[in-house]
Amino acid sequence: MTEKEAAERIERISFYEGIFDELKAADPGEELSEELTEKRRLLEQYYTSGEWLSDYEADDAGLLPADLKRGVLSQDGVYDLLERLDASAGPYLGPAGPGGRAVRNRRCYLPGQGRPSLRA
């Protein structure tokens, strides 16, 4: 990894870390503002992209500075936050799924990616 690539990676992680912290601080009983909704979308987009995995692997390989704040790279942190935000938004009563039941999870999973386990 070049010095420029390392600097870009650190800047990207810091950017999403700020969004992660801001969304964690959001009141779970309140509906997200338009700005926070957009930030939530950006965080989910990062988390489901190859960039998050690449950043996670760089961290795992010890390629990131020790003093870099990196909660956004925890395996469960972002997923759990997105689930909490989705739950506080209320049930999704969108298009009916198989058997006529309403689809509750707004996230889409591509074929072959599997589906994450649902925790109680």
Image (cartoon, helix red, strand yellow):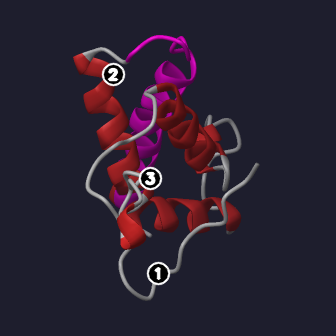
Of badges 1 and 3, the one in the foreground is 3
Q: Give the quarter of the image for residue 35.
A: top left
Q: Position of residue 66 (x, y in %)?
A: 71, 43
Q: Name the residue under label 2.
A: 36
Real-space Cα separation, disc 3 to disc 2, in angstroms:
19 Å
Q: Mark 1 points at which residue?
A: 113
The residue depicted at 67 percent of the width and 51 percent of the height is: 76
Quarter occupied by the N terminus: bottom left
Disc number at residue 105?
3
Q: Can residue 70 be seen in this view?
A: no
Above-or-below relation of 66 to 75:
above
Q: Residue 66 carries which label?
A: none
Q: Distance between the residues labelled 1 and 3?
A: 16 Å
- Magenta stretch contains residue 8: yes
Question: Residue 44 location in percent, x, y?
Answer: 39, 48
User: Which of the two residues, 34 or 119, is positioned nearer the viewer here?
Assistant: 119
* 22 sits left or right of 118 in the view: left
Q: Which amino acid does label 2 sit on?
A: Leu
Asked if the residue under mark 3 is in contact with the one under mark 1, i.e. CB atoms within 8 Å, the reply is no
Going from the N terminus, do you reach mark 1 or mark 3 first? 3
Toward the bottom, the furthest residue is: 112
Mark 1 lies on a secondary structure that is: loop
Name the residue rendered at 48%, 67% in the picture: 54
Mark 3 is on which residue type? Answer: Asn
| 102 or 44: nearer the viewer | 102
Residue 47 in magenta stretch? no
Q: Please state the horizontal and vertical placement of residue 37, each as a whole percent of the image.
A: 30, 27
Q: x and y percent of residue 72 in the render?
A: 57, 42
Name the secondary structure under disc 3: loop
- SS assignment at label 2: helix
| Residue span colored magenta | 5-31
Three-letter amino acid code of the residue under disc 1: Gln
